[in-house]
Image (cartoon, helix red, strand yellow):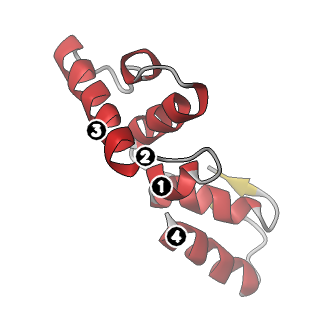
Amino acid sequence: MLEGIALARTEAEAGADLIGVGGMGIGNTTASSAIVAAMTGEPPHRATGRGTGRTRGELQAKAEVVARALAVNRPDSTDLLGVLAGIILGGGAGSSERGPNAV
């Protein structure tokens, strides 16, 4: 997360006027599900979606990962990205501080 923010800031300070970040769709909805569960108080099995077509068993495993992440990190609502997000979501957050971005 912090690496993504730092990279976006470095590029913006070097003169970039548009920063685009993206991923292959692997894991982003898991982090997003954890953030939604933490923000809303919904249990992980309700806040977690299939993502890219996961099976019923894979969806259950994904919800369990979200539950473990919440239990281990015990996020507070003022630092959800710092605790639960990765470099892609962090890059988007960091790039949005400086102006236009594409995620």
- Can residue 23 be seen? yes
> How many other residues sit within 10 Å of disc 1, few (<14), some (14-19) or many (≥20)?
some
Mark toward the start of the polypeptide (1 vs 4)? 4
Q: Which residue is mark 1?
A: 83
Mark toward the start of the polypeptide (3 vs 1)? 3
**Kind of residue at badge 3:** Arg
Q: CA distance from mark 3 to mark 4?
A: 21 Å
Residue visible at 58% across and 62% down? Answer: 91
The nearer-to-camera label among 2 and 1 is 2
Secondary structure type for disc 3: helix
Q: Which mark is residue 71?
A: none
Q: Which mark is residue 68?
A: 3
Q: Which residue is mark 2?
A: 74
Q: Is the Cβ of the residue at disc 1 closer than 8 Å to that at disc 4?
A: no
**Kind of residue at badge 2:** Arg
**Kind of residue at badge 1:** Val
Mark toward the start of the polypeptide (2 vs 1)? 2
Please state the horizontal and vertical placement of residue 7, each as a whole percent of the image: 57, 76
Mark toward the start of the polypeptide (2 vs 4)? 4
Residue visible at 43% across and 42% down? Answer: 31
User: Along the line of sight, which residue is nearer the eye, 83 or 17?
Assistant: 83
Q: Is the Cβ of the residue at disc 2 closer than 8 Å to that at disc 3?
A: no
Q: CA distance from mark 2 to mark 3?
A: 10 Å
Q: Is the Cβ of the residue at disc 2 closer than 8 Å to that at disc 1?
A: no
Q: Which residue is mark 4?
A: 2
**Kind of residue at badge 4:** Leu
Secondary structure type for disc 4: helix
